Image: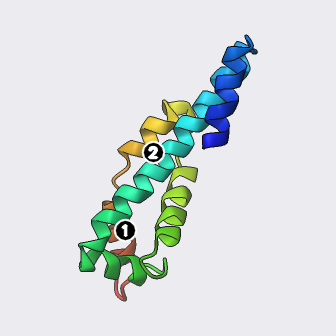
Amino acid sequence: MAEIRDSVDQLRLHDGDPVLIEELEAQHRILRALYDSARELYDAGRADSLLQADFTAAGMGSWTFENVYSFVYEQTMALDPGSGDLAALITDLDYEDLIRVAAAESRPGA
């Protein structure tokens, strides 16, 4: 993310292509939203053993930041980018609810 931010700064400093600057800024916002969402979910789950259990029960592995980030990333791939600002859509998802639903669906008899 820092590399993208540095590239944008350099492009602005040297009157770079505004379209490229806008694309890089959008990419940075999306990456930041992914990281921040994963970090918030991970931190919430560290204090919630039921959420961790549901995560594991849904087949997502153990409660590690890498696994949580992968889950957040996979959920965002299902979003329709044409329905708004992708970074905002990523931030607005209720990841805890998605985990609980996935765990409930994975239980026998569900």
Report the residue that reaches farthest toward the bottom. Answer: 108
Q: Residue at x 51, y 71 (%)?
A: 67
Up-down relation of residue 96 to residue 56 (above or below): above
- The amino acid on which the numbered mark 1 sits, given as a three-letter code, is Ile
Residue 79: image location, x then y, percent:
52, 46
Nearer to us in this view, 31 or 92: 31
Q: Residues within 10 Å of mark 1 (few under 14, many from 20)?
A: many
- Residue at 33% from the left image edge and 53% from the top image edge: 94
> Can I make out residue 47 in this image?
yes
Residue 57 at x, y = what percent? Answer: 39, 83
Disc marking residue 9: none
Q: Considering depth in this image, is 99 or 19 the residue closer to the camera?
A: 19
Q: Can residue 106 be seen here?
A: no
Question: In the image, 110: left or right of 50?
Answer: right
Looking at the picture, how far across and down is residue 55, in whole percent? 39, 76
Q: Is residue 65 left or right of residue 94?
A: right
Residue drawn 31% across and 70% down? 45
Camera-nearest label, 2 or 1: 2
Q: Residue at x 45, y 45 (%)?
A: 90
Task: Give the crowd class for mark 2: few <14, some 14-19, many >=20 residues within 10 Å.
Answer: many
Q: CA distance from mark 2 to mark 1?
A: 15 Å
Picture coordinates of residue 60 (x, y %)? 49, 77
Element assignment for label 2: helix
Label 2 amino acid? Answer: Ile
Which residue bears the numbered disc 2?
Answer: 90
Quick one: quadrant of the C terminus?
bottom left
Residue behind mark 1: 99
The quadrant the N terminus occupies is top right
